[in-house]
Amino acid sequence: MARPIQGIETTLQIPREEPCETCDGSGAAPGTTPENCGHCQGRGQIRFQQGFFTVARTCPRCGGVGRTITIPCHTCHGSGHNTRERKLTVKIPAGIATVQRLRLSGEGEHGGRGGSPGDLYVVVHVHDHAFFRRDGDDLLCDLPVTYPTLALGGEIDIPTLTEPTTIQIPQGTQADTRFRLRGKGMPNVSGRGHGDLIVGVKVAVPRKLTREQKTLIETLATTMPTRVLDPQAIETAEERPVFERIKDIF
């Protein structure tokens, strides 16, 4: 199902048992009517005594309906219904997620012998997006960013489901830092605002370098203390510097 951010109308074609037009759903041939079952006298149940108790069972002759059809309808053969294809227009609300269900009242199967129809439940499946991942109403994505931008800072363009936006990358931003863009996620299916867009920045390593670029990187490498940095313990949220903890405010 496409475009869950905007919602969509789609058409379903489903088979359903409809009341027979020849007998109006009675199952009896035109000009005749169902008769009371002589086995249960129209009660639909057979009662018998078993010790001190009275036991009731469904009548085996009429199936609990209480009526029998002497001359069945030639169109539906006494069933009272025929299978027909129906087209339904279903409105898929914005923000719906996979496996959520839509209930269409009165669009299910009819009850036996002219009974009222039940409901139809439509289970929605949303195709995965090529770039965004969904977590509730939030969207997550990874964005490759060049090393100079992470080291020196700068502006980068962020794709969203509507139109691109720009955020400022602080100087010295580490790989896998996440930036939160408020209200840029999926709309809530109940209409209660939007989720957030969470962007994780990754270091974009070029596969090919020009001679000038290679020379510059080699020069930069000579200024670094070691090729492999010392391992560090994982910091908790409280131990991280205040500046690092407020990066998710975007």
Image (cartoon, grey):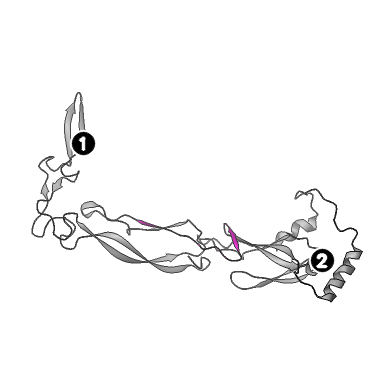
* SS at badge 2: helix
Could you say where residue 203 lies in the image, as x and y percent from the top left?
75, 64
Q: Which residue is mark 1?
A: 57
* SS at badge 1: strand
* Region in magenta: 118-136
Count of numbered marks: 2
Say which label, 2 or 1, has the lower sequence index.
1
61 in relation to 246, above or below = above
Of all residues, the one furthest to the left in this rendering is 31
Return the residue nearer the eye: 130 or 194.
Answer: 130
The picture quadrant where one finds residue 172 is: bottom right
65 in relation to 225, above or below = above
Could you say where residue 45 lies in the image, as x and y percent from the top left?
18, 39
Q: Which residue is mark 2?
A: 151
Decide: few, some or many residues near mark 1? Use Cα within 10 Å; few <14, some 14-19, many ≥20: few
Of all residues, the one furthest to the top in this rendering is 51
Real-space Cα separation, disc 2 to disc 1, in angstroms: 82 Å
Q: Amino acid at mark 1?
A: Arg
Residue 190 shown left or right of residue 10 in the figure? right
